């Protein structure tokens, strides 16, 4: 069985992509979005990225929480979209056969707004992100000196930091994977049918079924063109300092 994992910061259409794969793939692909248990991987990823969890224990948890699920699949290809696995990509490649990693990135400004609209710092989510030490990866987890300023940061700026940290962790873990690793922009994936088709084929879908899958993409998935209006001018000025060369690398404006 060949495995593919779709990772990102979240708010990048990974659920929609898994849904399309599930609906169209027929008897060739088992596609899941954050199958249970999943949230435990968010903690595992943060602990490993922070240097507090060894590769040996990380692999143990991967085998324990995913090995059985993957082995039970009757289809030829297993695809999982799971943003919580951002810190485990290289280990997934070592653990399972033929693994490919699809890394979806999104403009940090619209990403932050989308996260805030979905209540990332409100209610139960807000309590967990504030008081559970390794639920939300923060600058201090990677030894960044500005960590002490986290509580004083605005919500947009915190999410700019999160965007940067998660994308850098994924890139660092996948730098040696060659053709088994691919980066696509959210804004392009759901607006460019040719790119969407090519991505589905790269994940393992047959050409004919991938062609049919493009018909399922509707305007409600294509939300990358929504106007940016949330952060203040001061917050926008901090964007380049926080996100650094990743903005230029991914083709986003500073």
Image (cartoon, helix red, strand yellow):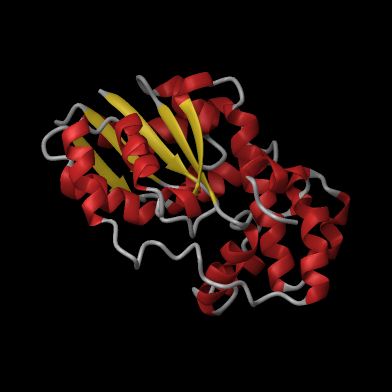
Looking at the image, which residue is at 54% across and 68% down? 115
Give 58 or 216, whichever is nearer the viewer: 216
Residue 160, picture quadrant: bottom right
As drawn, 184 above or below 54:
below
Residue 50 is situated, as x and y percent measured from the top left of the image, at: 69, 41
As drawn, 41 above or below 130:
above
Please state the total of marks drawn on the protein image. Answer: 0
Residue 245 is situated, as x and y percent measured from the top left of the image, at: 76, 43
Describe residue 136's horizontal placement relative to residue 18 as left or right.
right
Residue 5 is situated, as x and y percent measured from the top left of the image, at: 40, 37
Question: Considering the image in quadrants, where does the N terminus appear?
Answer: top left
In this view, the residue farthest toward the right is 145
Question: Considering the image in quadrants, where does the C terminus appear?
Answer: bottom right
As drawn, 116 above or below 93:
below
Residue 249, picture quadrant: top right
Looking at the image, which residue is at 42% across and 22% down? 95
Looking at the image, which residue is at 60% across and 57% down? 107
Give 58 or 251, whichever is nearer the viewer: 251
In the rendered image, is residue 76 in sight? yes
In this view, the residue farthest toward the bottom is 123
Describe residue 140's horizontal placement relative to residue 251 as left or right.
right
In the rendered image, is residue 152 in sight? no
Residue 135 is situated, as x and y percent measured from the top left of the image, at: 59, 57
As drawn, 80 above or below 148:
above
In this view, the residue farthest toward the left is 27
């Amino acid at each position: 069985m060949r495995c593919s994992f779709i990772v990102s910061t979240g708010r990048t259409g990974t659920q929609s992509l898994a849904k399309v794969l599930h609906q169209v793939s027929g008897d060739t692909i088992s596609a899941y979005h954050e199958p249970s248990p999943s949230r435990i991987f968010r903690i595992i990823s943060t602990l490993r990225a922070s240097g507090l969890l060894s590769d040996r224990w990380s692999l143990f948890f991967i085998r324990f929480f995913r090995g059985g699920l993957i082995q039970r699949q009757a289809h030829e290809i297993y695809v999982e979209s799971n943003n919580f696995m951002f810190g485990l990509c290289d280990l997934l490649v070592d653990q399972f056969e033929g693994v490919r990693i699809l890394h979806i990135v999104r403009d940090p400004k619209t990403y932050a707004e989308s996260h805030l609209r979905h209540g990332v710092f409100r209610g139960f989510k807000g309590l967990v992100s504030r008081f559970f030490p390794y639920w939300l990866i923060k600058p201090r987890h990677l030894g960044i000196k500005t960590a002490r300023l986290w509580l004083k940061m605005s919500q947009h700026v915190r999410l700019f930091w999160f965007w940067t940290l998660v994308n850098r962790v994924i890139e660092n873990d996948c730098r040696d994977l060659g053709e088994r690793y691919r980066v696509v922009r959210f804004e392009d994936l759901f607006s460019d049918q040719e790119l969407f088709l090519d991505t589905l084929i790269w994940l393992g879908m047959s050409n004919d079924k991938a062609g049919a899958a493009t018909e399922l993409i509707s305007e409600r998935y294509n939300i990358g063109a929504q106007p940016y209006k949330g952060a203040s001018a001061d917050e926008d000025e901090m964007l380049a300092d926080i996100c650094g060369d990743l903005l230029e690398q991914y083709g986003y404006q500073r």
